[in-house]
Image (cartoon, coloured by chain):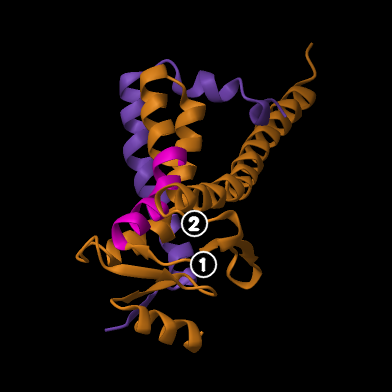
Chain colours: A orange, B purple
Amino acid sequence: MPDTNNTISTIITSTMGGLFGFMYGTVLFGVLLMIPHELIHGLTAMVVGKAKWKDLKFGMMWKKCAAYCHCGVPLTVAQYRWVTLMPLILLGIIPSILSFILGNSLMLLYGMIGITVAIGDIWIAWLLRKEDGSVKVYDHPSTAGYFLFDTDEEFEEIKQSI
Amino acid sequence: MIRKSEISLLKANLLSLLLAAVVAGVLIPLFNWIHPEKFITNLDNTFFIRV
């Protein structure tokens, strides 16, 4: 006669272990995704905004649970849109589309995490939706936001105020 | 004219939960409809499930 208690215990343990392992893996992946996410912001600023590596500042706002990449040179709104949305495209939208083509649900899961962690970037892009692409923008160095300005004098004023 | 915009990271973190629910609510049923046999089997073979 099979040991019923042992069988039930095994089923519960393996199910819960699998579920917690899966949740742990998902959260861990979301946290680890911050690194390539911020690197893509920086690399896009270098490619489209002609920023240098030394102009970029990477860090973590521990109190707000958010990683950041600050670009120290002003960009146009059109360039800033690319910088803001590139991690969403590369780590969220493309893996999600590929998952449908390849039939890979794990890739879909990671694509969904890539979309979810880009919420701040989507919000910034939404705020900029009505701005002309040629307007100049300076990334806020210490919080999630930006300054829009027109002239070099205004840029100097911004730099002195922060 | 200088214009400053900021977003609240606390609200962004809360919104990300909402976005996760919406994205999962749309994409998972869509994937399951297109590849009905693959959704669970792919995940079942992952390292995290096996652990």
Is the residue A157 above or below the residue A74 in the image? below
| Residues under numbered marks 2 and 1 in contact, where contact means CB atoms less than 8 Å apart | yes
Q: Position of residue A106 (x, y in %)?
A: 51, 28
Q: Within the magenta stretch, is there residue A80?
A: yes
Left or right, A25 with reference to A139: right
Is the residue A75 above or below the residue A88 in the image? below
Chain on which label 2 sits: A
The residue closer to the viewer here, A149 or A33, is: A149
Residue at 40% from the left image edge and 25% from the top image edge: A98
Residue linked to disc 1 = A72
Residue at 36% from the left image edge and 20% from the top image edge: A101
The total of numbered circles placed on residues is: 2
Residue ranking furthest to the top:
A1
Q: Position of residue B18 (x, y in %)?
A: 39, 56
Where is residue A18, by image quadrant? top right
Amino acid type of the residue that numbered disc 1 sits on in the rendered structure:
Gly
Q: Position of residue A88 (x, y in %)?
A: 41, 46
Amino acid type of the residue that numbered disc 2 sits on in the rendered structure:
Ala
Q: Which residues are magenta?
A: A77-91
**Secondary structure found at label 2:** loop
**What secondary structure predominates along the stretch shown in magenta?**
helix
Badge 2: how crowded within 10 Å, few (<14), some, or many (20+)? some
The residue closer to the viewer here, B16 or A57, is: A57
Residue A56 seen: no
**Secondary structure found at label 1:** loop
Residue A92 seen: yes
Measure the C-alpha gap from mark 2 to mark 1.
Answer: 8 Å
Same chain for marks 2 and 1?
yes
Task: Classify the position of the N terminus of chain A by image quarter.
Answer: top right
Residue linked to disc 2 = A51
